[in-house]
Amino acid sequence: MHQAKSVEVLVVGAGLAGLRTATLLARHGHDVLLVDRRTTLTAAIRTTGIFVRRTLDDFDLPPEHLGPPIRRVVLYPPSLRRPLTLDSARDEYRVGDMAALYLTAARAATEAGVRIALGTRYVARRPDGVRLAGPNGPDVVQARFVVGADGARSTVARDLGLDRNEHLIVGAEEVFAVTASEGPPAFHCVLNPSLAPGYLAWVVNDGHQAHVGVAGYASRFPDGLRQALDRFAASAPGLGSVVRPDVVERRGGPIPVGGVLRRISCPGGLLVGDAAGAVSPLTAGGLDPCLRLSEQAAAMLHDALRSGRPDALAHYDGAALRSRVRGRLVLRRGWAQVRSPAAAAAAFGLLRTPPGRAAAARILFGDRSFPSPAPGVVRPARAPAAGRAGRTW
Ligand SMILES: Cc1cc2nc3c(=O)[nH]c(=O)nc-3n(C[C@H](O)[C@H](O)[C@H](O)COP(=O)(O)OP(=O)(O)OC[C@H]3O[C@@H](n4cnc5c(N)ncnc54)[C@H](O)[C@@H]3O)c2cc1C
């Protein structure tokens, strides 16, 4: 743990949201300490790492750490028979090498001036300072603002008196290297509530890596998440003759799908990423939202630090953003009601109709992403020398 006991901003959590917020603030010249309880950023990765086209267009992620573009999505009913294949004319997804991306983002943060303390756990916020537990024991840090980038079950949110995620699903996946793909890189999604209750089971095989996963409501897995994953992995589609190695990397964690939380800021700080519920309620994609919301958060914090106005964070308003994902929340609630394979098969029938197919293509290949702030609500952050196309990673 470093020696400084006073910082302008303490960012808790060095996932993508925390790394990005910290970097942008440091580029504005602010004094930022970023802590994470993990001792290395390459361990305990939670995400598959599928980046959507809008993110790839708007943020210059290092291409050497991204897998081949994916244009094909194959949707399967519970029987796995007669799947529906959707091909896009554009590159829609790329799977990130997340360990490398976290390290690259951490390097960018350090270069911008962020001090990163790994193996350091946020314990509590007290009137005399923030309690941390680091490799050298307990510590107290005074911070003008605290940023909760500490994931779906945020302790910072609790201590700041902000909203917390209540509507969560859980996901788990296996990742392993593949040497070749029999077809084009593809994203396979199985809609089967007995395997993945309320969400889906997936295989992403881009010819470099295969990710095999399931996610759904924790209380509804008939025999638990782990068993559901084992069951699915034993007969997952999209792997062709790929041989699964004996030892595979396992990832997993909770995913908030209740939409952006309403109260995500207060005079003492704010929330970003999963802590703020910034995940698409329908697709459960959180990488694009966490990058975009971090930009808004950094802009607000910069303004607050520069102006010294006590109400400067008041416009960092989850309710305004939440109202823009209402349609996706309705669809999530609808899919959550589909509880049996027979009902899922019937719903799948609708996807085979031309309007159903068009709706699926709109969701999977659409141009929408996490809502930008309404004019006058928040000003987007601009890192020096960064433009819309190619915001510096
Ligand atoms: C299995 C799975 C697959 C997914 N796949 C995709 C996908 O392919 N595409 C997509 O867009 N989204 C995906 N998501 C969602 C996406 O990964 C998340 O929305 C995104 O990674 C959130 O980033 P974050 O920085 O907010 O949180 P996290 O990456 O969870 O980071 C939070 C950090 O806070 C740290 N932390 C927590 N508590 C403390 C504490 N008390 N003190 C110190 N540090 C603390 C943790 O160690 C962690 O490093 C997936 C999620 C799961 C679970």
Image (spheres, rainbow, N blue to C red):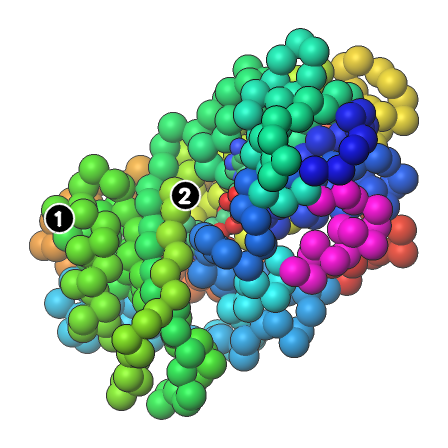
Q: Quadrant of the C terminus?
A: bottom right
Lower position in the chain sequence, tag 2 or tag 1: 1
Residue 1 visible in the current orientation:
yes
Q: Is mark 2 within 8 Å of ligand 1?
A: yes
| Relative image position of residue 109 (x, y in whole percent) | 76, 51
Residue at (55% x, 63% y) in the render? 98
Camera-nearest label, 2 or 1 = 1
Residue 278 visible in the current orientation:
no
| Relative image position of residue 389 (x, y in whole percent) | 76, 62
Residue at (70% x, 38% y) in the render? 1
Q: Judging from the image, what secondary structure is the residue with disc 2 in?
A: strand
Type of secondary structure dominating the magenta stretch: helix
| Relative image position of residue 132 (x, y in whole percent) | 61, 28
What amino acid type should be assigned to the residue bearing mark 2? Ile
Instruction: Residue 350: say if magenta.
Output: no
Vertical comparison of 293 with 202: above or below: above
Question: For this rendering, which residue is in front, 163 or 342?
Answer: 163
Count every numbered label the image shows and give the total.
2
Vertical comparison of 269 with 65: above or below: above
- For this orientation, the residue located farthest to the top is 127
Residue at (71% x, 44% y) in the render? 116
Instruction: Residue 115: say if magenta.
Output: yes
Image disc number at residue 223: 1
Vertical comparison of 57 with 305: above or below: below
- Magenta segment: 103-116
What amino acid type should be assigned to the residue bearing mark 1? Asp
Q: Judging from the image, what secondary structure is the residue with disc 1 in?
A: loop
Tell me where residue 353 sits by quadrant: bottom left
Judging by the rendered image, the residue that carries numbered circle 2 is 255
Residue at (80% x, 25% y) in the render? 6
Q: CA distance from mark 2 to mark 1?
A: 20 Å
